[in-house]
């Protein structure tokens, strides 16, 4: 057991109080004391500091069973803001959120080319624009980046993104341009955080988040903690082999799951079968809804391949929830029931009620919202309590 000095105890109490207020929204100091087992004088001192910082305010009196009425303390989600940035296929997206993860402003800019110079320049422009839209008296808690591929968080670098042909993309110079903390995260880990904090898997014990875009990535919450592996590279589930003599992958292997289960693969299969050149998932979905036979066949095959990988993940991790995110989540009405049926068909190890397979309710924004949440979680120290 690690002994805590007085300053560490106070800091930990502060984190716990902010966390409680962010959940309860309005609560009295006496209730805080009882719920967290912190003395009333200590609670009062910390609340006074938070009022001065503008994070909470007094909001009237609560009812009393006798004696002086207690003062209600109210959490102010708009007292701080955070920025999330997501590198997507052909574009950079950025959002400004409050402490609740509500999106205040959203920007999207196409990339002229996928190069280090262009990507970083575009990100800088979007961050500057979002910061200019904020109230000057409200503090920016930082910028979080949702990035495809393997991340070196310590050295602020995107090491390798196979589908973007990017290597060693350094963010230190970008960080020097802004006087706020910056955090890099793999896109699927960011999405998992958003689902666990804001989405369908809020506060669940064991969650797998599957990010489907140009590739396929995974984020894991195990026993309510993010699992990243010994070198923080866990989650490259798109590169598990489901057909050893299968399709060539950008990573150099053959038969990787993402060559069958990514959004890019779905669109490519449709184009190959129809001799068309559609670029967007919505085009394939529209064809399916119009009862076009090629679209129906492609989606049937796609769901089978998606289910194959999901079953592998279930067998390994035994999760409570599997959440599927990305643009595909907007079309859950045509994917969900068929996918669930396929996952549990002839599955002697799991029944449907054992694992909840759901499509994200965050409207395709899980990854970028997760990026925006990171500065809030890190800034308030919620990861340490």
Image (cartoon, rainbow, N blue to C red):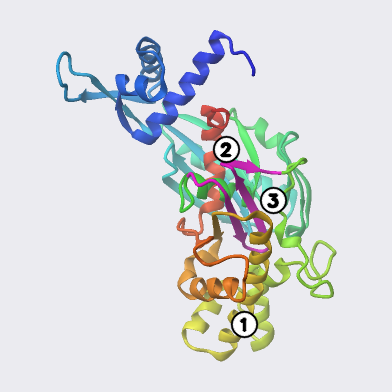
Q: Which residue is mark 3?
A: 118
Between the residue at mark 1 and the residue at mark 3, the CA separation in whole angstroms equals 35 Å
Would residue 108 be counted in the magenta stretch?
Answer: no
Q: Residue at x 51, y 34 (%)?
A: 376
Residue 7 appears at what percent x and percent y? 54, 11
Between the residue at mark 3 and the residue at mark 2, the CA separation in whole angstroms equals 19 Å
Left or right, residue 222 beside residue 68: right
Quadrant including the C terminus: top right
Residue 358 in the image: above or below residue 117: below
Q: Secondary structure at mark 1?
A: helix
Q: Mark 3 Cα within 10 Å, few/some/many (few <14, many 20+)?
A: few
Q: Mark 2 Cα within 10 Å, few/some/many (few <14, many 20+)?
A: many
- In this picture, which residue range is highlighted in magenta? 203-228
Q: Secondary structure at mark 2?
A: strand
Q: Quadrant of residue 20?
A: top left
Quadrant including the N terminus: top right
Q: Residue at x 46, y 55 (%)?
A: 362
User: Is residue 327 at least partly visible in the picture?
Assistant: yes
**Mark carried by residue 143:** 2
Left or right, residue 56 beside residue 121: left
**Mark carried by residue 150:** none
The answer to the question of whether label 2 and label 1 lie on touching residues, with beta carbons closer than 8 A, is no
Between the residue at mark 2 and the residue at mark 1, the CA separation in whole angstroms equals 39 Å
Q: Can you tell which of label 3 and label 2 is closer to the viewer?
A: 2
Q: Earlier in the sequence, mark 2 or mark 1?
A: 2
Q: Can you tell which of label 1 and label 3 is closer to the viewer?
A: 1
The secondary structure making up most of the magenta span is strand
Q: Quadrant of residue 158?
A: top right
Q: Earlier in the sequence, mark 1 or mark 3?
A: 3
**Mark carried by residue 298:** 1
Residue 269 appears at what percent x and percent y? 67, 80
Q: Can you tell which of label 2 and label 1 is closer to the viewer?
A: 1
């Amino acid at each position: 057991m690690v002994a805590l000095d007085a300053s560490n105890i106070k800091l930990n109490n502060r984190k716990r109080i902010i966390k409680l207020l962010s959940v309860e929204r309005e609560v009295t100091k006496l209730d805080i004391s009882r719920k967290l087992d912190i003395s009333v004088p200590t609670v009062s001192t910390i609340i006074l500091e938070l009022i001065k910082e503008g994070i909470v305010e007094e909001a009237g009196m609560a009812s009393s069973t006798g004696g002086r009425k207690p003062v209600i303390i109210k959490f102010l989600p708009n007292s701080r803001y955070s920025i999330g940035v997501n590198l997507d296929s052909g574009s950079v997206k950025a959002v400004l959120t409050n402490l609740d993860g509500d999106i205040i402003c959203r920007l999207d800019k196409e990339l002229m080319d996928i190069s280090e110079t262009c990507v970083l320049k575009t990100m800088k422009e979007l961050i500057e624009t979002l910061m200019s839209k904020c109230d000057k008296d409200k503090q920016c808690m930082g910028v979080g980046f949702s990035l495809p591929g393997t991340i070196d968080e310590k050295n602020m670098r995107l090491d390798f993104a196979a589908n973007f042909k990017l290597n060693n993309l350094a963010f230190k110079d970008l960080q020097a341009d802004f006087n706020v903390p910056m955090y890099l995260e793999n896109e699927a880990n960011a999405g998992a955080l958003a689902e666990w904090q804001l989405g369908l898997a809020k506060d669940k014990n064991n969650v797998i988040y599957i990010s489907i875009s140009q590739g396929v990535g995974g984020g894991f919450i195990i026993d309510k903690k993010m699992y990243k592996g010994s070198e923080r590279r866990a989650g490259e589930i798109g590169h598990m082999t489901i057909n050893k003599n299968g399709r060539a992958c950008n990573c150099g292997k053959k038969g990787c799951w993402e060559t069958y289960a990514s959004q890019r693969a779905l669109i490519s299969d449709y184009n190959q079968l129809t001799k068309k050149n559609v670029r967007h998932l919505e085009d394939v979905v529209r064809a399916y809804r119009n009862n076009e036979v090629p679209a129906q066949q492609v989606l049937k095959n796609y769901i089978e391949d998606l289910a194959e990988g999901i079953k592998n993940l279930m067998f390994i991790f035994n999760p409570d929830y599997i959440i599927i995110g990305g643009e595909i989540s907007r079309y859950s009405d045509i994917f969900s029931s068929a996918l669930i049926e396929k996952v549990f068909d002839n599955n002697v190890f799991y029944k449907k009620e054992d694992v909840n397979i759901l499509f994200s309710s965050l409207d395709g924004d899980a990854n970028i919202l997760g990026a925006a949440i990171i500065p809030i979680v890190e800034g308030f120290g919620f990861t340490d309590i």
